[in-house]
Amino acid sequence: AKPLKIAVIPGDGIGVEVMPYGVRCLQAVGKVFDIQFEFEEFDFASVDYYEKHGDMMPKDWKEKLSNFDALYFGAVGMPDRVPDEVTLWGSLLKFRREFDQYVNLRPCRLLNGVASPLANRKPGDIDFWVVRENTEGEYSSIGGKVFEGTERETVMQETVMTRIGVDRVLKYAFELAQSRDRKKLTSATKSNGISITMPWWDSRVVEMSKKFPDVAVDKYHIDILTAHFVQRPDIFDVVVATNLFGDILSDLGPACTGTIGIAPSANINPNGTFPSLFEPVHGSAPDIAGKGIANPVGMIWAGQMLLGHFGHKKAADALLKAIEDVLGRSEPHILTADMGGKGDTKSLGEAIEKEILALKG
Ligand code: NAD
Ligand code: IPM
Ligand code: MN
């Protein structure tokens, strides 16, 4: 088989610190399961690059990246140096839009060995997917300011939903629900308050559900849904949400499973016209950057999703098991501080790498 060509984009802060362990774990899996990778690293999509070049990426970034099978992305943002909206709209949000990665798939799973902040929850109780619309919705550039600097100063930013955009992500979420044992889909809405776009979203869910009669559908307004994530996480199987609601739910869900430091995110272009992007859910964490203590599991698990995306099911299952086995041993000198341990990025990253290398393909 041809090698998988992976563009490695570490970004900023802890993105740079966790990326090497992501790559090493993929290389280790490649060795065991005979999968070839070709990694090429890029220094753009970072604040350093911005300060040197006045832009987050070179003009020809799209040509440079289009021929890769996937992008493996760390995290971007150093808000003390460059405003977040500049760095994120200049990199990650550009990738999602221009590469039409309209599905953002994010698992919430309570793993063995990781303590949940929720009382009396054990592995198996929390195991669901958030499917987040990833190219439109509340994240729009339609809007502006008028009467700036006066008392009448007014700012607007429109939510944009299209039938194609919403239907395609709903279809993906319904298909995912259909493939699972429980076959249950929950839609995040707010049609009581957001009175134009959200009732329409609800109507698209009803319409799509007609094509999936075996999938049980329910919906909750986003406010009570966040409460249910905390108090009844066991009722969820697949949760589909707009861009902003999905963003919020996909930090809350992983927090309920112990730490956002372990959560991965697959930004998928399902038809394969453009590369998909795999990244941790977390950001560049300026508060801990440079200390070598960031949890590398989100980055490594993102690599696991990459393997699954390309059909390497055996390898993907083995990598997830290696993560679970290492965490499950609950060794304080291995685990990072966000999981209550005394270890660091290196101890945990290398323990997972070693666990993989001990496997047989
Ligand atoms: P964050 O995820 O970077 O950090 C939130 C908190 O979680 C911090 O206290 C941090 O120390 C902790 N944390 C995050 N990841 C961790 C890990 N792997 N191990 C241990 N602790 C971890 O979110 P934020 O503080 O809102 O954002 C910081 C910067 O990152 C901002 O510039 C923001 O815009 C950016 N950001 C980027 C991405 C991305 O590139 N995908 C995602 C989220 C935020
Ligand atoms: C995420 C992040 C991004 C988002 C930010 C950094 C723009 O929070 O991937 O969850 O809101 O999508
Ligand atoms: Mn987020």
Image (cartoon, rainbow, N blue to C red):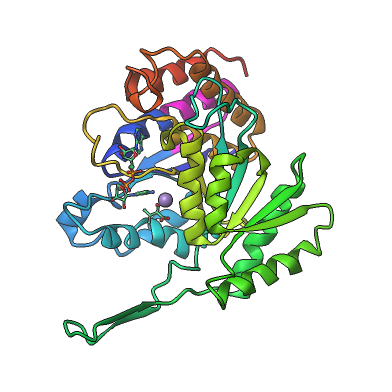
Q: Of 51 and 280, which appears nearest the observer?
A: 280
Can residue 76 be seen here?
yes
Q: Measuring 53% from the left and 29% from the top, which residue is drawn there?
A: 119
The image shows residue 125 at horizontal and vertical percentages of: 64, 31
The image shows residue 211 at horizontal and vertical percentages of: 81, 62
37 drawn magenta:
yes
The image shows residue 121 at horizontal and vertical percentages of: 58, 28
Left-right relation of 235 to 118: right
Q: Measuring 19% from the left and 84% from the top, which residue is drawn there?
A: 151
The image shows residue 261 at horizontal and vertical percentages of: 41, 34
Q: Measuring 52% from the left and 40% from the top, which residue is drawn there?
A: 4
Left-right relation of 251 to 185: left
Instruction: Name which quarter of the figure residue 158 lies in.
Output: bottom left
What residue span does the magenta drawing correspond to? 24-38
Identify whether 327 is placed above or below 278.
above
Left-right relation of 36 to 180: left
Q: Which quadrant of the frame does ligand 1 lie within?
A: top left
Q: Of 184 and 307, which appears nearest the observer?
A: 184
Quarter of the image with the C terminus is top right
Please, what is the dominant secondary structure of the magenta stretch? helix
Can residue 69 be seen here?
no
